[in-house]
Image (cartoon, rainbow, N blue to C red):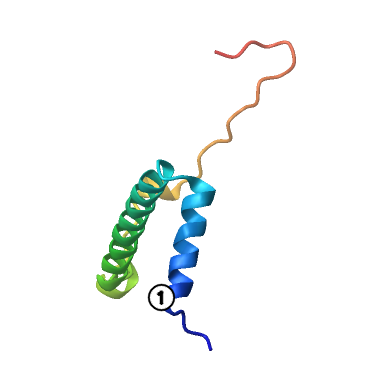
Amino acid sequence: MGTFSWTHLLIIALLFVLLFGAKRLPDAARGLGRSLRIFKSEVGQMQSESATPTTTPAQDATPAPPQQLSASAAQPQPPVAEPQQGQKTL
């Protein structure tokens, strides 16, 4: 039980030929082969991408020394005036 004998496989093959026809079976097998090939290459790419060690910038970089703010940066900037009703903007 649970295993197919050669007679079971022969019956299944005959059913496929009857259902799909002899002309469409090679095309279906070719399409299945292409799909499996594409799937296999995509899985390989995903595995190679996950295998390369990726580090976050916080782990690699040493802490930067604190920067001194210049005098012009410390001064507050005047607020930008919003155009009033009736004025045109450029």
Residue hosting label 1: 6
Q: Is residue 31 above or below residue 37?
A: above
Direction from residue 61 to residue 32 in the image, left or right = right
- Give me the residue at 29% from left, 58% from top: 41
Residue 55's quadrant in the figure?
Answer: bottom left
- Give me the residue at 28% from left, 64% from top: 44
Specify the amino acid type for callout 1.
Answer: Trp
Residue 43's quadrant in the figure?
Answer: bottom left
Q: Is residue 62 among the parts visible in the rendering? A: no
Q: Residue furthest right?
A: 85
Direction from residue 46 to residue 19 in the image, left or right = right
Tag count in the figure? 1
Direction from residue 21 to residue 48 in the image, left or right = left
Q: Is residue 29 above or below residue 11?
A: above
Q: Tell me residue 19's x, y (percent).
A: 54, 50
Q: Tell me residue 59's x, y (percent).
A: 30, 75
Q: Tell me residue 21's x, y (percent).
A: 47, 45
Rendered-image quadrant of the C terminus: top right
- Nearer to us in this view, 21 or 71: 21
